[in-house]
Amino acid sequence: MKIAVLFSQGAGKKNLYNQIGDSLSRKLSEHKIYTHSGNFGQFYLEKAEVLSTEMPRDYKLMMKQLIHALADVGPDLFITVGGDGLAAYVADALITGGYCVPVMGIAGGTANVGPIVSINPEDLDGLDFQNLTFKKIGAIEVLEESNHISYGFNDVVISNTFLGTDDGKMVSLSVREMVEKGEKKIDQPSRNITTMEFSIRKDERILDHCIKRPAQIVISPLEVDKFYGRAVTGALCMSAFSEYKAAVALLNETVIDTGGGNKGIDSFIGVEHILFSKDEIVSISGLSDDGQIVIDGNPYLRSNETVTFKYRPDLIKIVTPK
């Protein structure tokens, strides 16, 4: 079996990556492993075939070229070692590039909560690579003026910050500083992500909502059974019984925030949910300069007044633990 392995440059810790690399080298000793140079995999995998690829300065373009180079060798499985952000980059590049390769995510990042990153490092030694479990998952497609931005498999957040790691600690980092300068700058999540012209549409219909100036907006696919029949989750509990497998949440407090304090513990957080299906389009307008886009932890700067969201089912096949 041919297996492509890509490690994240910025997520996790070096000693953890060494441990994961040692485990993979043992488990995959009878398979052909392909990876990239340096800390993209070469430093952690003993007997992998190392690919050399041009490294453009633009990080997202570089990642796409690395992923396509690995996919071009025709792997039977693509392994990511890192967090949700790396897994999303890989899945997006494979889907948009027309590659049909299953993906397995090994946790080694800042946040490891998405559906792709489902394997813990301590579970690797017990994993049978000849007897894997596969399933298809969908995602939220994010577009600006019909231009594809990326797929979000866990969540898409409208915010000026994203969660990252700095000196081994989880912090909130500036979207703008990372995208424009490639620099980690600790920042606070802004509550002013919208303007007075904020509106949200489902298809062509403007939706009424009580939270007029949300502090945070989250859009997520709902493809798990955690909401099944639990009325405390509000409208989300109905997703299990219908074709509405995605949702938008308007929140009056910032939830994705390292300094959350006692919000939602000593005081209520106001949330409005609305479900949508694969046949519906949701668009958001009236975002401020602080209303940028974070897709599975990866930062993007808006270039348009309106951002569009579509639910796309069964996009890619992933490996899940039995």
Image: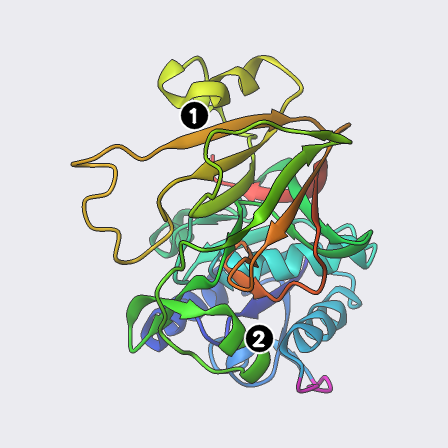
Disc 2: CA contacts within 10 A as few (<14), some (14-19) or many (>=20): some
Q: Residue furthest front?
A: 196
Out of 244 and 270, give the one closest to the viewer.
270
Q: Secondary structure at mark 2?
A: helix
Q: Looking at this view, is 89 or 131 the one in front?
A: 89
* Three-letter amino acid code of the residue under disc 1: Lys
Does the magenta-highlighted stretch encompass residue 242?
Answer: no
Left or right: 197, with 168 as reference point: right
Q: Contact, CB < 8 Å: mark 2 with mark 1?
A: no
Dominant secondary structure, magenta: loop
Q: Residue at x 59, y 62 (%)?
A: 30
What residue range appears in magenta? Answer: 52-57
**The one of 37 and 265 positioned closer to us in this rendering:** 265
Total numbered circles? 2
Figure quadrant of residue 64: bottom right
Of the numbered discs 2 and 1, the one sitting upstream in the chain is 2
Q: Residue at x 43, y 25 (%)?
A: 226
Q: Find residue 179 and name its label.
A: 2
Q: Which residue is mark 1?
A: 226
**Neighbour class for label 1 at 10 Å: few (<14), some, many (≥20)?**
few
Whole-percent x, y for residue 222 in the image? 55, 31
Q: Nearer the viewer, residue 186 or 127?
A: 186
Mark carried by residue 115: none
